[in-house]
Image (cartoon, rainbow, N blue to C red):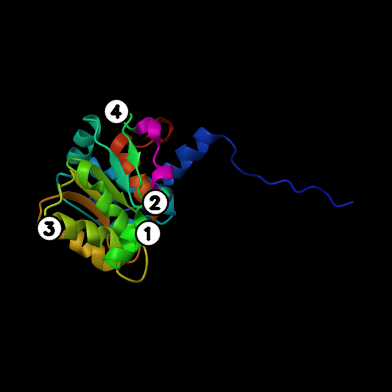
Amino acid sequence: MESRPRYDYVKDPAEIYRRSFAIVRGEAALERLPEALRPMAIRVVHACGDPSVTAHLVWSDDVAEKVSAALAGGAPVFTDVRMVAEGIIRSRLPASNEIVCTLNDPRVPALAAELATTRSAAAVDLWRDRLEGAVVVIGNAPTALFHLLERIGEGFPRPAAIIGFPVGFVGAAESKDALAVNPFAIAHVAMRGRLGGSAMAAAALNALAGGVPEEARA
C-alpha cells in the first residue's frame, strides 16, 4: 500500500497574504511609481508572480484620484470580458458599483458582423449611454481598447478612467501605446508591451478601489 504524501506548506490564509506581499515589496521596483499607485503595482505583481512587470506600467498622474472619485460617486465599471468582471472584488467597490460586461449581449454578434470587427470591440458600442464618467477595465481584447478610443474620437462620452491591460501578440502593445498618448486627457494606467491579462486588469482595479488586504499591509 502506497503511503499518502505529506507536504510542508503554509496553510493560514492571512500568513500566505502577509508573506506574499512582503516578497512583492522586497523584489518589485516600486520606487518608480507615485505613492498612490504602489498598492496597484503590488496587486498586479501578486496577480502574475513577476516583480519585473512594474517596469512596464505607464500612467497618467491623475488616474488614482479619478478612479477613486468615480467609484465613490457610484459610476459603473465596464469590462471587456467576463474574466475581468469575475476578478473584481465586489466588497471593495465603495458604492456597490455595477460591473457591466456586454460581450454576451445577444445584439453583439450581428453588430460585430456589421462593423467587420471582433465581438469584444462591437460590445463597446453598447456602453455609450452610460459611459460618461465610468471606469473602463480592459484585460483581454486589444480590439476593444482600440475601438473604444476610436468611438471616443467620434463623439462617444468620455469615461473617467481607462485601465488598459489587453494581452497578446497582435495589437496588444499597440493598443496600450495608443492609450498612453490618448489625446482626450482621459486618466489611464496600462501595462505596455505584450504583457497583461484579465487577472492583472482586475487586480489593478481592486487596488485602486481598495488598496491591498489589511492582513497584507506592512
* Residue at the image position 20 percent from the left and 50 percent from the top: 188
Query: Which of the two marks, 4 or 3, is nearer to us in this view?
Result: 3
Residue 88 falls within the magenta-colored stretch: yes
Query: Which of the two marks, 1 or 4, is nearer to us in this view?
Result: 1
Mark 1 residue crowding within 10 angstroms, few (<14) / some (14–19) / many (20+) = some
Mark 4 to mark 3: distance in Å?
Answer: 30 Å
Image coordinates of residue 163 in percent, x first then y, are 27, 50
Query: Which of the two marks, 2 or 4, is nearer to us in this view?
Result: 2
What is the number of the mark on residue 109? 1
Image coordinates of residue 131 in percent, x first then y, are 21, 44
Where does label 4 land, which residue?
Answer: 95
Is residue 54 found left or right of 16 in the rendered image? left
Q: Amino acid at mark 4?
A: Ala
Where does label 3 land, which residue?
Answer: 153
Where does label 2 land, which residue?
Answer: 106
Q: Amino acid at mark 1?
A: Pro
Q: Amino acid at mark 3?
A: Gly
Mark 3 residue crowding within 10 angstroms, few (<14) / some (14–19) / many (20+) = some
Q: Main secondary structure of the magenta part?
A: helix
